Amino acid sequence: MKTGKFFTLAACMLCGMLAFTSCSDDDDDNTKKPEVNDGKAKMMLAVDMAPTASMGYIIPVKDENVTEVNFTNAHEQKSTPYICTYKDWVFAIGGTMDANVTKYIRNNDGTLTQAGKVQIDRVVPMCANMIVMNETKAYATAPVENKIVIFNPTTMERTGEIDLVDTKWGVNGSNTPNPVGLFIRDNILYVGLCQFDNMPVCKTGAYVLLIDTKTDKPIKMISDMRLSSATVMGVCGMFVDEKNDLYVPCWGSYGYVPGHHSGLLRIKNGETEFDKSYCFNFTDREYPDVKGNKIQYVLSSHYAGNGEFYFFGYCPAYASATGADYINDKTNISFKADLYNCTAKVIDLPRTNGYSCAISHKNDLVYFGLVTESAGTGLFTYNRKTGECSKTPVMKVQGSITDIRFCD
């Protein structure tokens, strides 16, 4: 991860299948039916081009069987973009280099058309995350301005904001809680608060603010001292399992501070406090298949269902002796975890760099965006049924893949 360079690394702080059908047919009475042109892109990729260039792209991918992605229909972004999708809408989230959310519409020919933009943070070029509630209401976080912006995702116009500059939401006398992650469950907006001391180091503990989506008024802030740094940008968001239990990922200040652990906390269905019986601590355990038996933190993860949780663990034993190089060092290892038994094992995929923050799944395949030492760059797969891993990319992609999203 770009440890110590928070503003240049959205990809670390911190994602479908591609088929199309086009058909026309005749009725028995030879009356021609309307042509169906279902050629919309089903997979969206966000890539960062560092160190080649300080820029990124949003790329629509139409055919899941392509072996190499081209940039013909790509839309240029600033570095480290993330993605949010809602029906036929695709939103490019600026991350740590751009304060804007840009909207695109999926076209029937597999392309995207830009359809608006809204500025989120007016203090720094940073937009941490966003979530769409419905066709007329969406939320996005401005972590430095300490606001949650409300906007209309149809028109891309601001409709309000929730100002969090208040000692009620800060820690130890601070009035800057630094909102980042967002999730809506049962009409409550859960907001992960990073509570920065000095970016990227956070104050001790994990903090989540609960907001009533009907009134947009804060309800309360909850905390848990077992882990630190609740939620990150883009790729490691809160999620619910099949029981509607909400899981909160924590990245532990990159492991800079002793006692700041990375892992998962839980808020059970129907409850609004952290579950004291659950804490999946990633950093305070040993992994026999990892050099040095330790990982320092987890930023990138994905829940695939049925208790299957996948993540990239940063292993400091693979960092350069002269200082970590988060682009060239292959420090990140792929893991499969059991959400309920709190166990994890290494997946037989090549190590990747700290910019690799993309994990997603479709059916039996879990996709990992990897930049490897010698096996290539792009999307690798893990088969959930057979346990088989691809040895080379099933889809070659230039640059580091920072996000993957599948569209219906």
Image: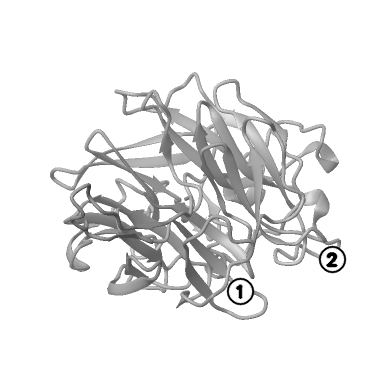
Residue found at x 76% / y 66%: 328
Residue found at x 36% / y 27%: 244
Q: Which amino acid does label 1 sit on?
A: Met
- Residue 297 in the image: x percent, y percent? 65, 45
Residue furthest toward the bottom?
A: 53
- Marking on residue 49: 1
Q: Judge by depth and name the residue closer to the eye, 65 or 212.
A: 65
Mark pair 2, 1: CA separation: 24 Å
Callout 2 secondary element? loop
Disc 2 crowd, CA 10 A, few/some/many (<14, 14-19, 20+): few
Q: Is residue 314 above or below residue 345?
A: below
Q: What residue type is labelled 2?
A: Thr
Residue hosting label 2 = 322
Callout 1 secondary element? loop
Q: In this view, does 314 lie above or below 5?
A: above
Q: Judge by depth and name the residue closer to the eye, 395 or 86.
A: 395
